[in-house]
Image: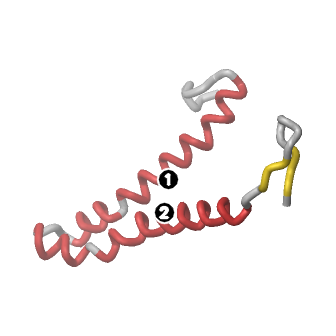
Amino acid sequence: MATQSAHGGTRRVRPWRMLALGVAAQTSGTIIVSVPAFLIPRLQAEFGLSLANAGALATAPTLGLVLTLVAWGRLPTDSASGSCWRSASR
C-alpha cells in the first residue's frame, strides 16, 4: 500500500512494523504487571514479608500503570480545554 508524500513521491506504509511495535508494547506491559505475582513466595522467604505485604509490593507495578494511564488519558482532555492538571473539582 503506497501513499502520496508531501514531496510528490510515494512512500511505503509499513503496517507490519506498527503491528510488531504494538505487540511488543502489549507483551512488555503484560510481563511488568504479571511477573511480580510469581515473586511473592520468594519475597516471603528471603525478606520475611507477610503475605499481605508481599502482595502489596507485587501490586505496585499495576498501580503505577493505572495512575500513568489516568494521567495520559486526562492530559489531552485538559490541554484541549486549557485547564491542564487543575483539580478534578469542576
Q: Can you say which quadrant of the picture contains the C terminus?
A: top right
Query: Whole-percent x and y of residue 85?
Result: 55, 28
- Tell me which numbered mark, 1 or 2, is placed earlier along the sequence: 2
Q: Is residue 53 above or below residue 66?
A: below
Name the side, left or right, on which 16 lies relative to 67.
Answer: right
Query: Whole-percent x and y of residue 29?
Result: 48, 62
SS of the residue under disc 1 = helix
Asked whether disc 1 touches disc 2, contact meaning CB atoms under 8 Å apart, the reply is: no
Spatial CA span between label 1 and label 2: 11 Å
Query: Whole-percent x and y of residue 89?
Result: 59, 29
| Residue occupying image coordinates x 56% and y 25% | 86
Q: Residues within 10 Å of mark 2 (few under 14, many from 20)?
A: some
The label nearer to you, 1 versus 2, is 2
Name the side, left or right, on which 80 lies relative to 86.
Answer: right
| Residue occupying image coordinates x 47% and y 64% | 28
What residue sits right under mark 1 in the picture? Answer: 66
Task: Please name the amino acid that badge 1 sits on.
Answer: Val
Q: Colour scheme of this structure image?
A: secondary structure
Res 18 → quadrant: bottom right
SS of the residue under disc 2 = helix
Q: Can you say which quadrant of the picture contains the N terminus?
A: bottom right
Q: Nearer the viewer, residue 41 or 3?
A: 3
| Residue occupying image coordinates x 68% and y 34% | 77
Q: Nearer the viewer, residue 37 or 24?
A: 24
Name the side, left or right, on which 65 lies relative to 23.
Answer: left
Name the side, left or right, on which 13 lies relative to 32.
Answer: right
Specify the farthest residue to the top: 82
Query: Whole-percent x and y of residue 20?
Result: 61, 66
Task: Please name the amino acid that badge 2 sits on.
Answer: Gly
Q: Is residue 35 above or below residue 63?
A: below
Res 4 → quadrant: top right
What residue sits right under mark 2 in the picture? Answer: 29
